[in-house]
Image (tube, grey):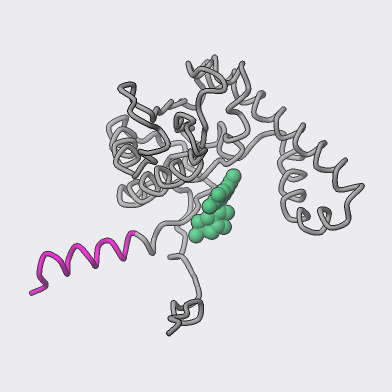
Amino acid sequence: MATKTEQDNAVLDRIIGERRSCRKFTREIPADVQVESILHAGLHAPFAAAAIGDNKDYFRRFVVVRNGSKAMKEISPLVFETVLAMAGDLEQAAAKNAQLREKAAGFMNRLAMIKDMGMVPGVGTAPFYIVAAEKRGFPPVEAQSLAHCMENMWLKATALGLGFQIVSITAQMADNPKFCRVLGLESGKWALMGCAVGYPAEKLSPSIRPSVTEVTTWPE
Ligand SMILES: Cc1cc2nc3c(=O)[nH]c(=O)nc-3n(C[C@H](O)[C@H](O)[C@H](O)COP(=O)(O)O)c2cc1C
């Protein structure tokens, strides 16, 4: 019989392998306790203690926006406007810079696709849009802390059989006073990252990556 360590290891490997980006959700609404357990996983992710300093006020916050809520109705056009502004700025910059044009081509296509859709995937396309906020510190490593937080949340969502989609445009909303006001966050004080959570509308294959040996060196 497998030892507890072997069982734990097998379960963790399976969850890591099954973690995928979900971009289509059903209308079924996960229970609030499931959402809370995802947030609990996010809270247990590492944080940049030295950058945050000795602060009694806790440095990580979550805002759970339900689909169809008043808050969702207010923030979705704000996020869409931000995408339009980003696309416009990038198009202007790329028109004058061939190197940027080549480098940003994939991202520009993605922004153009969002423009055509008239909405931002993940904001209003799943039962929950969750914003994680990390207090800005020095050095400014909030984005890294948020990435750890998101990964813990993603693995937990996977373990619960839920779909999870990163909504990275959320980072660009951190200094948007209207967006922050609706979410009850002080604008400029927090770095943000977001994700969409719900039941996946289709089963995705486990993640496919090269083998470890293909991408690893062990220098003498
Ligand atoms: C920093 C970062 C930002 C991302 N932003 C988005 C996003 O805004 N929307 C989205 O659908 N996926 C986003 N993704 C998901 C990636 O596209 C995805 O992880 C990658 O294509 C691999 O697919 P997998 O997650 O299914 O393994 C992001 C991932 C990372 C790490």
Work out whether residue 177 or residue 37 is closer to the camera in this orientation and state it: 177
x and y, in percent, of residue 141 in the image: 49, 41
The quadrant of the picture occupied by the N terminus is: bottom left
Task: Give the side of residue 168 with respect to residue 118, left or right.
Answer: left
Looking at the image, residue 63 lies above or below residue 218: above
Q: Can residue 128 be seen in this view?
A: no
Residue 159 visible to an observer of this rendering: yes
- Spot occupied by residue 40 in the image (x, y as percentages of width and height): 29, 37
Residue visible at 48% across and 16% down?
184
Q: Give the x, y percent position of residue 116.
A: 77, 40
Q: Mainly helix, strand or loop, the magenta region?
A: helix
Confirm whether the magenta stretch covers residue 10: yes
* Left/right of residue 197 with respect to residue 96 in the rendered view: left
Q: Quadrant of the C terminus?
A: bottom left
Q: Residue 17 is drawn in which quadrant?
A: bottom left
Could you tell whether 31 is left or right of 131 in the image? Answer: left
- Image quadrant of residue 34? top left
Residue drawn 76% across the image and 33% down it: 84
Which of 220/100 is in front? Answer: 220
Query: Of residues 62 and 139, which is closer to you in this image?
Result: 139
Identify the magenta region. 1-15
Q: How many labels does the image show?
A: 0
Q: Residue at x 92, y 47 (%)?
A: 96
Residue at the far bottom: name it: 220
Q: Residue furthest right?
A: 96
User: Measuring 71% from the left and 41% from the top, which residue is drawn there?
Assistant: 114
Residue 23 percent across, percent down from the top left? 54, 48
In the image, residue 194 lies in the stretch drawn in magenta: no
Vertical arrangement, residue 11 with respect to residue 191, above or below: below
Q: Is residue 118 above or below residue 201?
A: above
